[in-house]
Image: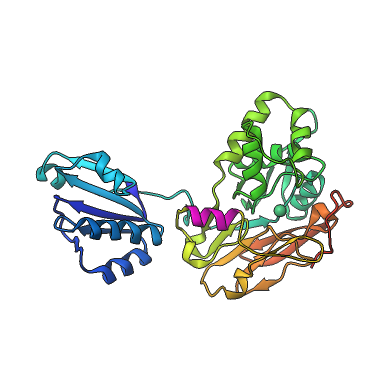
Amino acid sequence: MIPDLSLVVLLGARMAGALPVDRYDVIDRRLRAGGVTVVDATDASRAQRADLVVLAKRRSATPVAIAVGATEWSLREQGFRRVHVLPDQSAVDAVRLVTERLPNDLRHETGPFDVIGDVHGCRVELEHLLRELGYVVAHDDRGRAVDARHPEGRKVAFVGDLVDRGPDTPGVLRLAMGMAAAGNALAVRGNHEDKLVKALRGNDVRRDHGLAESMDQLAEESAGFRQRVLEFCDALVPHYVLDGGALVLAHAGLPERYHGRESSRMRSLAIWGENTGQSDDAGNPIRYPWAEEYEGRATVLYGHTPVAEARWVNGTLCLDTGCVFGGKLTALRYPEREVVSVPARRTWFARPGALR
Ligand SMILES: [Mn+2]
């Protein structure tokens, strides 16, 4: 099994259809197109091998080595992330390249979806929005929301930042985790989940931006619940590609060249986004305006930066309408592209500056 996006480099092994190592332009074009690219680098120099590893990483493909007569550690040292050392060519002949689906690849999930912006612990507003969208909310014997199901089989997709700042982060998690377990929701990882995971692991992180509120609220819950929260948040992926590639979800948005790719750069952009390094008058970081340059085919839905109104920019839509700051909680019905919002009950957390 190799990742769906791989550069397979043959060293002392032969496979039909492998590209010669000196066709750098063709290799690069194949990598950009996706899938698996196989290169025969048996006669390549050490520098050429190093170039292949660099090229694979630049295209967010996994560098895989299939070798005869080499040692695994030396190939790992050269930067190959998957290494298969085989005894001889007959063992290579028996190899079938089977690809595994990347964690972000949900192209087979076609919806319809209700994509919900940053919830930030606003459990009452979330239940309200779900009812507005036609979901039936289920409660446990203590009256706590534990699932929500749509009679027409729609699915919720959260763009991340379920937690922090708001009054009931455990309640939001209980509902979202119940929906996810029942197949009624999926979620991508927000920067607040990223940090909550570290805090729940006992790492020393600054409990600012509403993390202190979450930790205090979770301290009231059982250790078992906190463990399930840790596992749920830790398993969230940075972005999803859905609906045959037509829809991408990422908390902070994502430029097209990272759609369906796995890399630390993708992860950082999808979860945290990119700042310009400047701040507005109220001290909020100014985000790099990636959406204004977006020319991709997929619709990109995201949150992260609170806006007064959800507004389409080049096929991208920010669904964070600042509920926890007294704005509203917003969903996009997909593929209908209908925006549905409910107002915040009150301002739960003060934000410096007004919503734009
Ligand atoms: Mn947020």
Residue 169 forms part of the magenta stretch: no
Q: Is residue 160 left or right of residue 38?
A: right
Q: Residue at x 54, y 48 (%)?
A: 237
Q: Is residue 85 left or right of residue 244?
A: left
Residue 249 in percent (x, y) is at 58, 58
Where 246 falls versus 140 (above or below)?
Answer: below
Prevailing secondary structure of the magenta residues: helix
Residue toward you, 20 or 132 = 20
Residue toward you, 182 or 52 = 52
The quarter of the image holding the C terminus is: bottom right
Residue toward you, 311 or 108 = 311
The quarter of the image holding the N terminus is: top left
In the rendered structure, which segment of residues is drawn in magenta? 264-271
Where 21 falls versus 64 (above or below)?
Answer: below
Residue 286 in percent (x, y) is at 70, 65
On the question of residue 47 being in view, the answer is yes
Where 85 falls versus 16 (above or below)?
Answer: above
Residue 172 in percent (x, y) is at 73, 41
Q: Is residue 68 left or right of residue 177?
A: left
On the question of residue 111 being in view, the answer is no
> Which residue of the protein is positioned furthest toward the top in this rendering?
223
Residue 269 forms part of the magenta stretch: yes
State the image quarter where residue 199 is shown: top right
Tally of numbered tags:
0
Residue 124 in percent (x, y) is at 82, 45
